[in-house]
């Protein structure tokens, strides 16, 4: 059986070999003897004062420097978390805890790990204001102005949408938010590794990152925080991570996060040079089949294509393609269990009948033109089969 072709990199990415090699000593198991034995088995607790603990602490701080360097931040602004979900919750709930309940504004296309904590805050007395987007998944600037006129205390707008790949002008949003007296947060999880991301240039107060989207491990993320922002911790305990995120650090994952960030410059150059070409090749083939490409008129991530074929259900097509050896998605991996249409497509005003057919292809560094062509051929075959079955059932 041929190896399946993975086309779901917005859900997660494989851990790069160099990242894995740097992580291995910090698991502290299965490495006794040989070149990997002895003091290379660094399983200490970073809070311990002995040599093992100091080695672990040094590894965490070196990783912190690498993550900071990747996004134009200072190491003291990096708070390690278990991933993007925790970082987004920390940004919203942590900031809200220091503020008088007011208006929290988020875009209508945010990931559930922003919209759900926002709704939690609404139950605690906050007013939730959702900023509209246009048919191309771009923030409605007029609605943004109306929102800011309500003097929100906190604004959260993602840098790149995980489903459509559409980019938002977060720097402009942050500038307007600051003028309105609001804190600005951006979820940059999908953007990192696929476009240049600079904390200072964006001008936000907080920014969320995740390791497993950039060929690093699952279980590590970060919230980049301007030092002027006060955050209440979600977890109380030993006071790790500047007292903002207690709990013994996941040293192997954090080391892997740093290693993945260190590899970003070379990977980003390849994504920008080759990714758009592959996506355009894919979408040219999709259009010949009659597919609707969502957010095609917006500036998008170079690796992402979200599309639908009329009269074909996305979930059915995803399962058929999986059997044919191609891993794609029908939307965000974190909400794939839901039978409802994508909230992102609903916010864009896409007809429900078309939205039910949504399929996302997100390309990675290992994908090739030959794989794109093979996918298109498989898709064409599955479409013919599904439509033939539908015709027979209609008789």
Image (cartoon, rainbow, N blue to C red):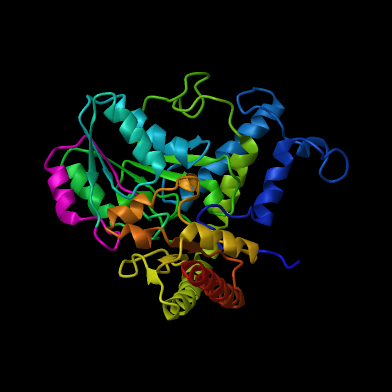
Asked if one can make out residue 225 in the rendered structure from this viewpoint, the answer is: no
Q: Is residue 246 left or right of residue 73?
A: right
Q: Is residue 299 left or right of residue 50?
A: left
Residue 29 in the image: state x and y as whole percent.
78, 36
Nearest to the observer: residue 11 or residue 82: 11
Q: Is residue 68 left or right of residue 161?
A: right
Q: Which residues fall within the magenta stretch?
A: 134-158
Tell me what residue is drawn at x 61 percent, y 32 percent: 57
Asked if one can make out residue 380 in the rendered structure from this viewpoint, the answer is: yes
Residue 362 in the image: state x and y as whole percent.
50, 62
Asked whether 144 falls inside the magenta stretch, the response is: yes
Nearest to the observer: residue 284 or residue 180: 284
Q: Quadrant of residue 319?
A: bottom right
Nearest to the observer: residue 273 or residue 139: 139
346 is higher (above) or lower (below) than 1: above
282 is higher (above) or lower (below) than 307: below
Asked whether 147 falls inside the magenta stretch, the response is: yes
């Amino acid at each position: 059986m041929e190896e399946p072709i993975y086309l779901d990199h917005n859900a997660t990415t494989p851990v790069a070999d160099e990242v894995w090699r740097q992580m291995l000593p910090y698991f502290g198991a299965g490495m006794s003897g040989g070149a990997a034995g002895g003091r290379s088995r660094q399983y200490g607790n970073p809070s311990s004062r002995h040599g093992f603990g100091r080695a672990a602490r040094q590894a965490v701080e070196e990783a912190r420097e690498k993550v900071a360097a990747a996004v134009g931040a200072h190491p003291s602004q990096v708070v390690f978390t278990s991933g993007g979900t925790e970082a987004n919750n920390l940004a919203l709930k942590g900031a809200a805890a220091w503020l008088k309940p007011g208006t929290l504004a988020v875009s209508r296309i945010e990931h559930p790990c922003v919209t759900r904590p926002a709704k939690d805050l609404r139950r605690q007395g906050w007013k939730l204001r959702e900023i509209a987007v246009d048919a191309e998944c771009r923030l409605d600037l007029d609605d943004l102005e109306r929102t800011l006129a309500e003097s929100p205390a906190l604004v959260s707008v993602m840098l790149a949408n995980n489903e459509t790949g559409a980019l938002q002008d977060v720097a402009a949003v942050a500038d307007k938010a600051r003028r309105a007296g609001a804190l600005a947060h951006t979820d940059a999880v999908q953007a990192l590794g696929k476009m240049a991301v600079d904390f200072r240039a964006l001008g936000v107060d907080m920014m969320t990152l995740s390791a497993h989207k950039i060929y690093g491990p699952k279980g590590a993320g970060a919230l980049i925080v301007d030092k002027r922002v006060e955050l209440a911790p979600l977890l109380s305990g030993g006071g790790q991570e500047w007292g903002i995120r207690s709990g013994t650090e996941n040293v192997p994952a954090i080391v892997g996060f740093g290693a993945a960030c260190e590899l970003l410059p070379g990977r980003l150059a390849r994504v920008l040079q080759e990714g758009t070409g592959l996506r355009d090749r894919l979408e040219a083939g999709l259009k010949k089949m009659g597919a609707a490409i969502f957010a095609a008129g917006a500036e998008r991530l170079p690796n992402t294509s979200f599309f639908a074929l009329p009269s074909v259900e996305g979930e059915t097509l995803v399962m058929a393609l999986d059997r044919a050896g191609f891993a794609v998605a029908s939307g965000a991996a974190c909400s794939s269990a839901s039978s409802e249409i994508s909230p992102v497509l609903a916010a864009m005003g896409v007809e429900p009948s078309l939205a039910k057919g949504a399929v996302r292809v997100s390309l990675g560094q290992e994908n090739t033109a030959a794989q794109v062509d093979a996918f298109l051929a498989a898709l064409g075959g599955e479409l013919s089969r599904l439509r033939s079955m539908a015709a027979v059932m209609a008789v």
